[in-house]
Structures are given as structure tokens and as C-alpha cells.
Amino acid sequence: MKYIVLIFLLQLFSLSLSEVVVTPKIQCRAQECEGDNFCFQGYCTSCEITRRQWNQGKPLWGTKVGEAIKVPAYSNFGDPNVLDTKKDEFLEDSKRIFGEEVYVGQKYQCVQFARRFWIVHYNSTFGSVNYAEQIFYLQQAYNFNTKQSLQLKKFQNGDIHPPQQGDLLIWKKDEEEFPYGHVAIVISVEMESSYPHVLIAEQNYDQSWDARSFSRALRLIKGENNEITISNNRQIFPTREDLKCRDTEVTSQGVILGWVRLNIQ
């Protein structure tokens, strides 16, 4: 009887081994790994574990995640009450500084960060919107010092005029990943780099930043006719191939409409 049980266990063990799919190790250099893999210590490695660790380590709502040109950004992860009026932010001392109450936005939405950046650096704001995509169709902004309207310049993604620091990068509304669209601030543009990219700052996207001074470096493509196209995919640098894992097949399909510029004379 013992021998019969032993033989049965050996057969079962052999069967289970035959069903294990062994993924061969593929040697790699920078940016050589295809699909949902990245180059780690010389071998193509699945993004699955790295992505899971990031998702589990997201900072909670209200945690500071970075600061871009003296404007801090905070996590919106775990927000229990979307569009709760108790989270409305008004600029501190705005009545003393500007002679009027200045509305910034809902903590800690993407629109709130973009509006706060323009208030801090340009003493200006854009009009009221129900969702981020609408910013691209606004015609004017407002300056608190002069009490005058300012014209907004709009550039379609694919235009020959590259974005500049302080421009608003606007995403198209998408029911799956971007139900309200999205907005980010352009921090810098590197067109002549070996890895052309646009550094941006934002809230309510990944809920954590890739670096302390910017949230993401988006891939920039310059066409044959000097047209500038910005992708929602990160530009991957050889020293940080793991950042590829923060993008997914769904987020990669996000469409950037273009950029909006405050027309300051």
C-alpha cells in the first residue's frame, strides 16, 4: 500500500511540474525589452511585481508628493467625498492681497493644482469649469492685479510651436481612464536631448511623483515638418527603466489635446 501511495505522489508531482510554464531569462540592454517588461540587472523583467508595489505604496489623501517651482502637490488617493464643498480651497489672505476672495479649487484635484500654479506665478486664473478638458476651450483668463481679462493662446497637440514653462497641458475626456479629462503644468521642455521629453507637474494622476520636482517626463516626438507631438507615455531613461511599469496599456491611450498659454504682454 505504501508503494502505491508513493508512486501516486511521484506521478502527481511529475504532472504538476509539467504544467509549470518557465519563462526563459532574456538578456537586455536599455530599452530593449518588449511588452510589459523592463530591463533590470541585465535581464527583461515583468512589470507585475513592481507595479503592485507602487500601487500598494500610494500615499493617502493630503500627503505632499512633490513641489514644482515652489508650488506643492498633494495626493488625492482615497478621497472619500468627491466634489465635497468642504474641500473648496480659497487663497489665504486673498482679500488683503487682491481685494477679493480667490477660489483655487477642490482639494486635491488636477484643476486645483493648475489654478494654484497660475495664481502663485502669474497672479492670474482661468474661468470656472466642470471638468479639466473644458479648459482647452476657454478664451480668457483673469489677472487679479490689473482686474483685466487676458487672452489665452491654444496649441493643438501636433502644432509646430512647442509648449513652454507654465503652459497647461490638457487631456481629452475619456470614459474609461480620463472621465473628466486631465490638466498638468509644463515645467520644462527638452527637445534636443537624446531622450526628448516634457517635464510636467500635476495632481490626481498616479498619486505619487517620479521625482520631487516633477511628476512625469512625457515622451516628445518632433516630426519631419517640425510638428511637436506629446504622448501620455513616459520617456524612459536608461537609469530609470522601472518607470515604464507605471504606464499601462489603458493609460497609454490617453489623448493630449494640446496646451494653453497665458498671453502676458
Image: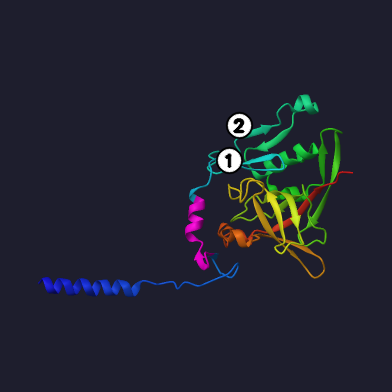
Q: Which residue reaches farthest left?
A: 1
Q: Nearer the viewer, residue 5 or 188?
A: 188
Residue assigned mark 2: 86
Q: Position of residue 49 (x, y in %)?
A: 47, 58
Q: Nearer the viewer, residue 223 or 259?
A: 223
Residue 85 figure quarter: top right
Residue 151 figure quarter: top right
Q: Position of residue 202 (x, y in %)?
A: 66, 47
Q: Is residue 18 left or right of residue 9?
A: right
Q: Which mark is residue 82?
A: 1
Q: Is residue 231 left or right of residue 79?
A: right
Is residue 62 inside the magenta stretch? no
Task: Name the element at disc 2.
Answer: helix
Given the image, on which type of amino acid does mark 1 rest?
Val
In the picture, which quadrant includes the C terminus? top right
* Image: magenta residue range: 40-55
